[in-house]
């Protein structure tokens, strides 16, 4: 198992906290991006996993989250493109070579924004992040709106709010450990991010997914209480989708916890595929492997 390192990197948005687990010499670098309100700590299981041993792992606290500073320019930063720009600055500072992005929920949307735009990105695996069109109707089609889901736009969480949101996102794996992170988020972050999604201030990510020039894997928990499975099927099963889709039976919004073994097998296989392809550019529409349906 590699050694855990902590970085505090200066960016235009402020100081950004990064957690790193060193890998074997020459190993691939996997960059984890967390969901709204959470922090890099949500990926503790992956950092401790023997199935990912040997890989270099990075996990970034997005601006306004975890140990990172609140955004200096909230309006420009608290949207998918703004966060993608900050992650790009972090990668430029650390210079880890080409990376595999693994984005969960908000982090998945950030990864999609970076996929074809950042030359350091070799490919992306996203989960809990429906590729939505840039309009209100797209949000209504892709998301389950519930009382707990509405917390995603609330500026400040009470202890009860944080426990409810943790339970919504993590299901039976909600144990209170992430409540402090959920309560310490920059109060401007959640409302601004929610407005950017609902009012179409981001890129058309459905089009990004359909036209991706680099390898893309989508992992979806069939019991996700946040995202409509019917919408995710419409993405994964679309004739123009050239990536790979996995529908995980029995998993919810956080398959990296709720189906950890299967998720890590998918990730490890994806990293191996990318390493095998590294000497040639990925053609649009070239599948990484055939789409699959997997049990948790």
Image (cartoon, rainbow, N blue to C red):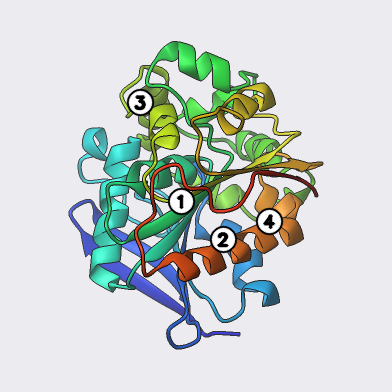
The mark lying in front, picked from 3 and 4, is 4
Q: Position of residue 200 (x, y in %)?
A: 35, 20
Give the camera-side residue of 202 and 196: 202
| N-terminal label among 2 and 3 | 3
Q: Secondary structure at mark 2?
A: helix
Q: CA distance from mark 1 to mark 4?
A: 17 Å
Residue pointed to by mark 3: 196
Q: CA distance from mark 2 to mark 4?
A: 11 Å
Q: Secondary structure at mark 3?
A: helix
Q: Are marks 2 and 1 in contact (CB under 8 Å)?
A: yes
Q: Are marks 2 and 4 in contact (CB under 8 Å)?
A: no
Horizontally, is 240 left or right of 236 in the view? left
Q: Residues within 10 Å of mark 4 (few under 14, many from 20)?
A: many
Q: CA distance from mark 3 to mark 4?
A: 29 Å
Residue at the (62%, 64%) spot, across then down? 269
- Look at the image and tell me whether residue 271 can be seen: yes
- Look at the image and tell me whether residue 175 can be seen: no
Q: Residues within 10 Å of mark 3 (few under 14, many from 20)?
A: some
Q: Are marks 3 and 4 in contact (CB under 8 Å)?
A: no
Residue 270: image tag: 2
Horizontally, is 187 left or right of 156 in the view? left
Q: CA distance from mark 2 to mark 1?
A: 9 Å
Q: Secondary structure at mark 1?
A: loop
Q: Position of residue 133 (x, y in %)?
A: 42, 22
Residue pointed to by mark 1: 215
Residue pointed to by mark 4: 263
Horizontally, is 290 left or right of 259 in the view? left
Q: Are marks 2 and 3 in contact (CB under 8 Å)?
A: no
Most extreme residue toward the left, as rendered?
Answer: 12
Most extreme residue toward the top, as rendered?
Answer: 137
């Amino acid at each position: 198992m590699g050694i855990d390192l902590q970085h505090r990197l200066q960016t235009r948005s402020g100081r950004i906290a990064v957690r790193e687990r060193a890998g074997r010499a020459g190993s691939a670098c996997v960059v984890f991006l967390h969901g709204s309100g959470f922090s890099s700590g949500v990926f503790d299981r992956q950092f401790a996993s023997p199935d990912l041993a040997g890989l270099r792992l990075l996990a970034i606290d997005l601006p306004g989250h975890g140990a990172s500073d609140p955004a200096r320019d909230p309006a420009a930063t608290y949207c998918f493109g703004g966060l993608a720009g900050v992650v790009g600055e972090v990668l430029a500072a650390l210079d880890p070579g080409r990376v595999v992005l693994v984005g969960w929920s908000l982090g998945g949307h950030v990864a999609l924004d970076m996929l074809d735009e950042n030359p350091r990105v070799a490919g992306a695996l996203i989960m809990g992040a429906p590729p939505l069109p840039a309009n209100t109707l797209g949000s209504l089609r892709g998301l389950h709106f519930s009382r707990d889901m509405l917390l995603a736009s609330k500026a400040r969480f009470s202890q009860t709010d944080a426990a409810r949101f943790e339970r919504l996102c993590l299901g039976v794996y909600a144990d209170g450990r992430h409540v402090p992170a959920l309560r310490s988020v920059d109060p401007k972050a959640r409302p601004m991010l929610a407005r950017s999604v609902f009012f179409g201030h981001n890129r058309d990510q459905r089009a990004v997914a359909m036209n991706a020039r680099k390898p893309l894997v989508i992992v979806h928990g069939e019991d996700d209480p946040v995202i409509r499975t019917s919408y995710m099927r419409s993405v994964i099963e679309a004739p123009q989708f050239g990536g790979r889709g996995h529908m995980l039976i029995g998993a919810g919004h956080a398959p990296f916890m709720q189906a950890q073994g299967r998720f890590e097998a998918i990730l490890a296989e994806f990293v191996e595929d990318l390493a095998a392809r590294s000497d040639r550019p990925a053609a649009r529409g070239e599948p990484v492997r055939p789409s699959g349906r997997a049990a948790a």
